[in-house]
Amino acid sequence: EAAEKGGYEHFMIKEIYEQPKAIRETMTGRLAKDDSRVVFDELKWTKEDVANIKKIVITACGTAFHAGIVGKYYLEQLARIPVEVDIASEFRYRSPLTDEQTLAIVISQSGETSDTLAALKEAKRLGARTLAITNVVGSSIAREADQVIYTWAGPEIAVASTKAYTTQLISVLMLALYLADLKGTLPPERIQELIKGLRALPGQAHELLEDVEPVKTFAQQYGFNEDVFFIGRSLDYAVALEGSLKLKEISYIHAEAYAAGELKHGTLALIIEGVPVIALATQHDVYEKMLSNIKEVKARDAVVIGIAMKGDEEIKKYVDHTIFIPATDKYLAPILAVIPLQLLAYYAAVTRGADVDKPRNLAKSVTVE
Ligand code: G6P
């Protein structure tokens, strides 16, 4: 096992560090050389195929479900198709309004999660066209779906999913750009700009992983708190959900993610002096709103760690600490912003002496209901 860990103490940290490579491999062969479009040889859809998609439903469990939430933003905003995202165990029992004009996307690292497989079968039964985004070639879900987009993350061993998540985001973003091109919902320059941004990501992820000391220090400093809150708006909210899941899964700290604009409707009651709040502020269109929410929690004496894009000096005035991610497009920010959150969860778990790769009561792949 030590050999498989390649010199790292745990699989989780090894897999976090494998992300630049995993991201690169997931994009390989799928971006046109002139950056003009995404090429999915595995799909080969025509304009007519795509015009028939009136709705998309995304179903998944756990981290893959969180990737689906990001996917909703990507597919709706870039390809202008209405998207519903549902937890697989909910979707399968709720008589979903799904038909031949629906594209059902299931996301699953293992391709073996029983609820996700059942949701896929249910969507098929209702006549939907089905597409799986999975990491395991020939898995049950890959075999059951009409079409498959593989994430080329390589084997993921740690129970807490990391590189599978970032490559799921890359895959669904590429899918959104592929659909946007076929539907003509984005100007060609914008597609090109996002593809250039995608190409820069492996290097930027690598850059982020070069300097983990600040995150390690926060994890050691706050790793013994019993509650941690994550807040964000828009895509940052989706990332907050994943950051909070990572922390609770492996460090057993009670972590809650809230849409920052909802704070006043509940969670604000729990914000007291010294409570750590991780505030994501990478989305410029809701940036000012986010700053107001940060002020709200600061006014209750929370300790705020801001996650922001390099170059954002403004944020420092409002937070106690800042973690910067390399500057990127708002749609690409989730792929980088999640990395410090993965590291925070990892180092918090190490600080607490938890079994990082095999957290209590959890399994890598849930093949029973
Ligand atoms: C389990 C794992 C999670 C994973 C989820 C869905 O809960 O511990 O890390 O996100 O299953 O797994 P899948 O293989 O379908 O992505």
Image (cartoon, rainbow, N blue to C red):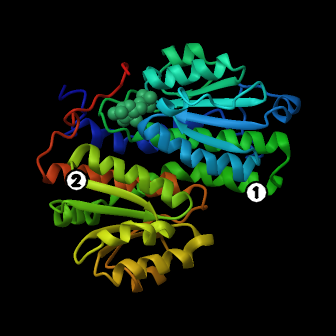
Dot label at residue 69 = none
> Is the residue at mark 1 in contact range of ligand 1, meaning its CB lies under 8 Å from it?
no
Q: On screen, 321 above or below 278?
A: below
Dot label at residue 190 = 1
The residue beneath circle 2 is: 253
Q: Is residue 148 visible?
A: yes
| Residue 39 located left or right of residue 164 | right
Which of 112/120 is in front?
120
* Local crowd size for mark 2, using a 10 Å CA cut-off: few (<14), some (14–19), many (≥20): many
Q: Disc 1 marks which amino acid?
A: Arg
Q: Is residue 147 visible?
A: no
Q: On screen, 333 above or below 157?
A: below
Which secondary structure, mark 2? loop
In the picture, residue 250 is in which quadrant?
top left
| Residue 2 located left or right of residue 287 | left
Which of 276/118 is in front?
118
